[in-house]
Image (cartoon, helix red, strand yellow):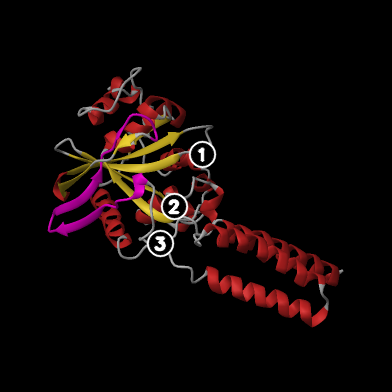
Amino acid sequence: MSKKVGRWFCYLACGVMLLFGTAAFWYSTIFPDWLRAGLAVLFPVLFLACLRWNGKIRLFGCTFLMVGFWGWYLTDPPRNDRIWAGEYAIPADTQLDGHMVHVSHVRNFTYKTESDYTPSYYDADYDLDKLSGVDLVTSYWAGDAIAHVFLSFGFSDGRHLAISIETRRQKRFSYSTIAGFFHHYELFYVTADERDLIGVRTDIRKERVYLYHLQLASETERRLFLSYLTEIHSLNTHPQWYNTLTDNCTTGILQRADARWRYRLDWRVLLSGYTASLAYDLGFLDQKYDFPTLKKMSRIRRPEGARPDADYSQEIRENTLEKQEE
């Protein structure tokens, strides 16, 4: 029985290796594309050919392929010098001088449609002493299980800086959810005006967007903001791979917040559409209402045909039932 179990375990391991290796080559950033596609075909062919042999030949062949694959995959470096899709072409950078923060290249695109936009960036200075709150934004484009999650930092002068942890997509690739499990996207912190980052979701894509005000101590807000700023600056010289499971929009927030591992492993981290309910259970959202009521009240409601303007940040906070209840 033990030999049979061992044999099936080997079959399973080989199957997983075959699928993972094939997908890793197909979704890799290897250039040119014919080489990437060729390796995605050649790897499973050679792997299956090795399995047809017996004894030492099979052992040597499979070992050689696995060592070669993992040697490439684990040393495949993320880069900042690729030809990026327009919305990821220019990263933000940050510089801290005492209590003042200088942020360069704050994105502020104007959208006609999701793919037709006018690029625009600006530089801005933010006073850490005027940091007045942090909002959690969840945006749904299909069902309730999956959402894009990001934060927006507010200041007492009325300004807001939205920061979203996303995939940095190359211009030559279309978006793929599966690709995010492999070395396909670099990690990117979209640092933007709310008119861009939230406005494209509420007014252009017509997604269901919710805005929750986080109940955090002022020192926690400051530490969280500084953590984001440090990572934004670091990625300019030390790029990282995005990973759908370990380095995504939700895990990145928890990492920046220095959350305990038991929270990072919560099932709602993977099913990001339930991230707000996790925040509620952790006591980070208003406990005056039960969560279903709070969620209903926190949805951003925009007039038909609305477009983000200079008063967008104020308007989206007024046009929630939570604000109207006050």
Write the start and end of the magenta stretch as one range: 86-115
**In the image, residue 247 lies at what x, y percent?**
45, 55
Residue situated in front as seen by the camera: 44 or 209? 44
- Residue 293, image x, y percentages: 43, 26
Q: Secondary structure at mark 2?
A: helix
Q: Which mark is residue 259?
A: none
Residue 92 image offset from top left, x and y in percent: 26, 52
Q: Quarter of the image holding residue 114?
A: top left
Report if residue 155 lies within the magenta region.
no
Question: Which residue is rendered at x = 72% and y = 77% of the image?
Answer: 61
Write down the residue under mark 3: 240
Q: Amino acid at mark 1?
A: Ile
Residue at label 2?
Answer: 251
Disc nearest the viewer among 3 and 1: 3
Residue contact between numbered discs 1 and 2, judged by CB atoms under 8 Å: no
Q: Residues within 10 Å of mark 2 (few under 14, many from 20)?
A: many
Quarter of the image holding residue 214? top left
The reply to whether residue 17 is visible in this rendering is no
Q: Amino acid at mark 2?
A: Thr
